[in-house]
């Protein structure tokens, strides 16, 4: 159950070196390496193409039409963090724009992930400040109702603990528990090493049917070839 | 109540100089300067990135699957106008393509805002003719049922009077009543002047919490910091 | 009725020369040339801008969360084919990524059209392998339940027979029956020839109202001009 | 452009007798009688079946997650009114429940039409207080940001002036300008009188093709019968 | 590819006795009996609860905002038919109301399945004329553009041939090829006979885990029980 | 992070007496009593009207198109439980029908809450077995991929721990942490006691403006009354 009106100052962040490694693999590989869990819903999209990042989560619970807690969150940002914001109700308002981005960047934030709307997308793009959001809207917000900062929360269907590693790219956003960041990075590396060989074979025309030895299980499942 | 089958030829356009100034501020700033009203729903998106424009509205009410009135509207376009089109029912057909864009441009139109679909997006992009629409669809339309031109109408949730100033960029589309265009441009200028200073402070690491003097109201609202 | 568990090996593809010509016209023109039928629903969008292609359909019926049949389909691909995949239930998982793209390309595939999700979009973009999909998602799939390959199927609201010509660009995806590909290409060419002249007139300021002789039918329909 | 922070106390309501007549016809007939304009979008649905009503609009502009203005509106309700509420951003919160319904009814309100969410649907149903809404949600709202009461506003795509006649049933919600209520009621009556005869013929097996004399225009349009 | 402007008069209907049997099983059982194919998308919903029917399809292709072809279709209805209507573009208008229902019933139609909107739902409910639709809307339609009657078409994602058996209830709508109706009814009967025994065991507390012998495959798949 | 392939047998359920009390208050009151947290998204709707229940959560994580884990979950059900099921990807298939309902009821389950589809709705309604779901679909599922039972999971945007109290009615579904069930029931009782008095005043025509002393804060916020 969410606690409202709380700011937790001390959180345990994922180890920076592991987070850095995760950034290199991208979301699809990390998601596979975790056993296909922790992915946010696919309506979370980047506001500009090309960004592929990872960082530790500072979490923010917002109220609809109210971005007060993003200002509170700014103070809790440490170098390399990604702010992850959810709202108590679906809302497409523009909770975040270029002023907050300037502030977040000055505090060391790498990006924002928000299950809501953002605005000033032209300037955010010029700044190169990446955002994954549910929508874009010029509509501003008020500052009058409390939410919370650094509580566990659900963002776009994924549970996020403060300090968890967040990996985001054009394929979406995935959440890696802080304690598992290094282990998941290892698994991702192993997976990627394995893929290079597969890619070469497939590029040479070898079929996945043969490479993955699927012909027998397909036949057992009853697949029929006809002409 | 919409009047069907009407073309109003004489409309009062927003003053061109004021419209020109509005284009410079962008949608988020203009929307704030108006007191956060007049914004279209966020599903209205540009077909290509980068355009930021303003113009006076020539309004068009369409019937589903029928673009006859866009041809009627072309004759009413004056230099610097933006055509704003709504449909009597939600419809994603491609009401507008490169031929109409050629005609609209020849008449002086700067852009199209349409709560429906458009097509020939590749050519529209090459032409640099900006469109904000609800969807993209190759499906063409017929020319058999009357709508109206230059009546007040609702487009994507916003009321548009013919002649109103329309401002559009990547953040969305906002409607400024013609009579208020200059006043809103002044308010936007004041707002923007004010933002430069804030941006510099935030970039230097000053917190919004302090700059906006939020700590006391947050405490009064009951915010608790824990470790 | 779909047959499940079937792979049809011999299909009649649209004539390559006709397919090639269709690629040049783009979707909106081809759709008009066919009499405005055969278009997929407009939620099918390209994962990167700029691609405009045509090819013969290899069809794949998938089960939700399961991409086994895409591997089966790879073997049926011939040079110039486009794989067209639908799912027995709406599902946004990432059924297709860079490994399958490598394999499909090695087999001669030009593109994928899938009413579901794809992933590895960054690499697919770098490879220049075009995909039209309903969504993007990093979530991978299992390989355990049979679908079919090269059966007639419904993809995004359009009926696709194996071998049909598929034309896709930024405006969407259209299906041309294999036997009609040449005839439709002829009709598209005629249509396009006709458009150049219209475009020149419209660019010179001639109104569609006059060029298409709409004034009389509009008046008969009851259109009133007021000041 | 919406004015924020305004309550208009004196509004011109549609004549009660005309409103009463409109209630008897239902939404589809009234909408036809108006020339097919004024209809709200079809996502506005009744919370329980069976209600068919009409009344004069008291309009309310809400902020997302904030129902303060509904309390302000209660004081402006006169006997026979229908409260019509819109929100400055899409929001599904439960802005209205049984306490407000008790208050609205005590003031004479017949119903609520709200482009947002409501709650306490079980009690509202027991009370027989009809509501047309976009959604149902138990989530309550705060009372901290101003909107307006009795300003012209857009609700679910339709422009509503305070005092306009609102007609609502299972087919949706339609807005009749106050000054036209009697005239529209006359037109609806004429339409309905005409329908009885048609219904009898159709029930006897006469085809619309013959009754509406469609065979010739269909043939002219090119319709072909094949066996 | 759809043919536009065609009415096919002679179609081969599913055998009435088989259709009658299908009505008794309901959609979920028939869908299973067919091997899980032929189901329309789940947004197709009944306008009132309780109806469970089957009939032979008379198909209608509509244009957006235009119900002309429903009048043409009326003449093709034979006793026991279900009219299945799709539109060339997504459209929620109310294409069908009580007058058409009166006509359809007089011609012997059992129901309407329409991937679009309907109106006069109160009267349709009183008449007991069942409709499965995508939406409800009071908005009427024009009669000016040709579609077709009794061509193969795609309705809500399912391919429907004229004459196919249609089964519809609260679970949705399924299409059974005319030639397979009897065979599918047999399979459904076998399935249902089998279910009675299972239901009794499950009601007595036997677990599906044991009844379906799932414990071993679950263990093989790696399922772990922990305390 | 979800663990896949796990069944937890021993969970700590909310105290039955407290759960029983929660059922009496309904979702809106319980949600308020918790401080407006724990609510599932409003797309979760009951399959038939009238049910208002509470129980302890047995949680199930499903794979798309695969209901194997619901059979595994049946064995973990104790008297008074509510099964809460989520899926690793959005999926509208009918994961649950009358056979599973028979089994669940025999094991003591009161209801199902599932962020996916269900089928056999007619029989479920006759049985009086309540379900809150995202959709209804006749499409069945396979049994081949592992999920988990009794792990913490996110269902329709809410975090659910196994054993948590679930309250559901026509307003939606709310999750109460097991340890807080009694305390929340107390708060709900206090709230409800308070509401009776308010309701009487409002029914007598007292305005919320006066009862809640809103006039002064509204004036301070700048509200203007005009005639």
Image (spheres, coloured by chain):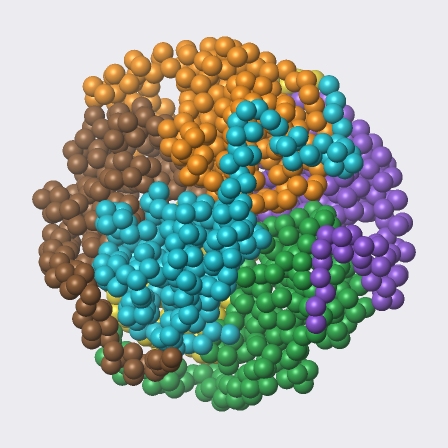
Chain colours: A brown, B orange, C cyan, D purple, E green, F yellow
Residue E98 appears in view: no
Residue at screen point 55% across, 11% down: B15
Q: Nearer the viewer, residue B158 or B63?
A: B63
> Is E208 in front, or is E111?
E111
A114 vs C118, nearest the viewer: C118
Indicate the position of residue E11 as horizontal and vertical percent values. 67, 74
Whether residue C162 is visible here, answered yes or no, is yes
Residue A51: quadrant of the picture: top left
Q: Is residue F90 left or right of residue D2?
A: left
Residue D69, percent from left and from top: 58, 30
Quarter of the image for the C terminus of chain A: give it.
bottom left
Residue at 13% across / 53% down in the picture? A185
At x 36%, y 11%, the residue is B193
Residue F29 pos. (x, y %): 51, 49
Tell me if E220 is positioned left or right of E17 in this view: left
Q: Residue at x 70, y 41 (%)?
A: B145
- Residue E185, position as x, y percentages in the image: 58, 84
In this picture, is B157 found above or below E193? above
Compared with A38, B152 (above or below) is above
Decide which of A126, F114 is in the foreground and name it.
A126
Q: Quadrant of residue A163?
A: top left
Q: How many labels sit on residues?
A: 0
Q: Is residue E51 above or below residue B24?
A: below
Quadrant in which residue A201 is drawn: bottom left
């Amino acid at each position: 159950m969410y606690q409202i009106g709380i700011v937790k100052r001390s959180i345990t962040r994922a180890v920076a070196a592991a987070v850095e490694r995760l950034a290199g693999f991208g979301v699809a590989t990390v998601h596979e390496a975790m056993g296909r869990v922790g992915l946010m819903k696919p309506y979370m999209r980047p506001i500009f193409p090309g960004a592929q990042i990872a960082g530790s989560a500072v979490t923010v619970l917002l109220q609809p039409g109210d971005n007060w807690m993003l200002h509170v969150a700014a103070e809790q940002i440490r170098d390399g963090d990604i702010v992850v914001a959810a709202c108590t109700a679906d809302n497409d308002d523009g909770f975040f724009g270029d002023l907050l981005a300037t502030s977040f960047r000055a505090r060391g934030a790498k990006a924002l992930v928000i299950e809501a709307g953002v605005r000033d997308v032209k300037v955010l793009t010029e700044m190169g400040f990446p955002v994954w959001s549910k929508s874009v809207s010029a509509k501003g917000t008020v500052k009058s109702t409390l939410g919370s900062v650094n509580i566990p929360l659900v963002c776009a269907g994924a549970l996020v603990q403060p300090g968890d590693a967040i990996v985001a790219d054009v394929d979406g956003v995935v959440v890696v528990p802080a304690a598992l960041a290094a282990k998941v990075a290892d698994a991702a590396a192993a997976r990627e090493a394995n893929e290079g060989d597969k890619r070469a074979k497939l590029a040479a025309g070898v079929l996945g049917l043969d490479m993955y030895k699927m012909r027998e299980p397909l036949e057992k499942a009853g697949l029929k070839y006809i002409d």
